[in-house]
């Protein structure tokens, strides 16, 4: 007589043993694990469908127990380790403009089979990738329309400000020469002013 297998009588989130044993999984921080858990809950709330179109807000993550300051590093971590794809980037702002990220779990089905990018992460790569992902990237500014400009790669607004300051300084220097021209000192033998002392 064979014993009857116990069945799960409600929704569940399946994880393969291969994934649980993987270097990528073992490198996940606690906050990153919670991010994955909350996205899986969102998938369950959508009836197991809509993977790739799962909206989870920062407030959702906070209510699930993740410190707000840990959310962005944890999201970068699960993406870098190949468990999650951001299919559509959200945007911050007031209620009218705010929009959450849309997520896809790479180890769950969409209308296609799972892509399992986490399988590509080796033992040597996993921890360095996780650590690097948790480090905040260069500060970015977001425009009203959600376009991101990175000052380190050339923020046009910042360049204009710097150029403006340089032009003002250069312009001031030119204005000094112009004043000399108007005063009639140019072309006359006047006693030259001593050179300014170096600062």
Image (cartoon, rainbow, N blue to C red):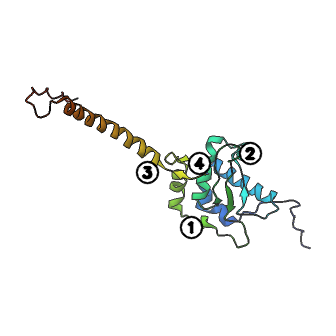
For the point 27% across and 34% down, the residue is: 175
Q: Position of residue 61 (x, y in %)?
A: 71, 46
Residue of label 2: 64
Secondary structure category for the residue under label 4: helix
Going by the image, does 123 lie left or right of 166? right
Q: Position of residue 138 (x, y in %)?
A: 49, 47
* Depth check, front residue: 173 or 4: 173
Residue of label 3: 154
- Please rate how many residues cluster around mark 4, counting C-alpha atoms within 10 Å: few if below 14, some from 14 to 19, many from 20: many
> What mark, if any, has residue 108 been given in the picture?
none
Residue of label 4: 73
- Quadrant for the C terminus in the image: top left
Secondary structure category for the residue under label 2: loop
Q: Are marks 2 and 4 in contact (CB under 8 Å)?
A: no
Q: Nearer the viewer, mark 2 or mark 1?
A: 2
**Looking at the picture, does residue 14 appear above or below residue 72?**
below
Q: Position of residue 122 (x, y in %)?
A: 53, 64
The residues bearing labels 2 and 1 have C-alpha atoms spaced at a distance of 29 Å
Residue of label 1: 120
Secondary structure category for the residue under label 1: helix
Q: Nearer the viewer, mark 3 or mark 2?
A: 3
Q: Are marks 2 and 1 in contact (CB under 8 Å)?
A: no
- Please rate how many residues cluster around mark 1, counting C-alpha atoms within 10 Å: few if below 14, some from 14 to 19, many from 20: some
For the point 58% across and 60% down, the residue is: 23
The residues bearing labels 2 and 4 have C-alpha atoms spaced at a distance of 16 Å
The residues bearing labels 1 and 4 have C-alpha atoms spaced at a distance of 21 Å
Q: Are marks 3 and 2 in contact (CB under 8 Å)?
A: no
- First reached walking from the N terminus: tag 1 or tag 4: 4
């Amino acid at each position: 007589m064979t014993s009857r297998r116990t069945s799960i009588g409600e929704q569940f989130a399946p994880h393969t043993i291969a994934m649980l044993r993987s270097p990528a999984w073992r490198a996940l921080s606690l906050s990153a694990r919670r991010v994955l858990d909350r996205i899986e809950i969102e998938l369950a709330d959508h009836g197991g469908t809509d993977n790739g179109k799962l909206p989870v807000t920062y407030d959702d993550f906070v209510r699930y127990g993740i410190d707000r300051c840990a959310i962005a590093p944890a999201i970068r971590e699960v993406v870098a380790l190949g468990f999650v794809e951001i299919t559509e980037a959200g945007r911050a702002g007031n209620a009218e403009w705010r929009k959450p990220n849309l997520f896809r779990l790479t180890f769950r089905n969409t209308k296609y089979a799972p892509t399992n990018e986490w399988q590509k992460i080796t033992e040597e790569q996993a921890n360095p990738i996780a650590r690097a992902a948790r480090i905040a990237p260069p500060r970015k500014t977001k425009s009203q329309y959600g376009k991101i400009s990175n000052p380190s790669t050339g923020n046009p607004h910042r360049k204009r400000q710097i150029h403006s300051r340089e032009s003002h300084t250069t312009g001031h220097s030119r204005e000094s020469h112009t004043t000399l021209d108007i005063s009639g000192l140019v072309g006359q033998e006047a006693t030259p002013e001593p050179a300014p002392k170096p600062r």
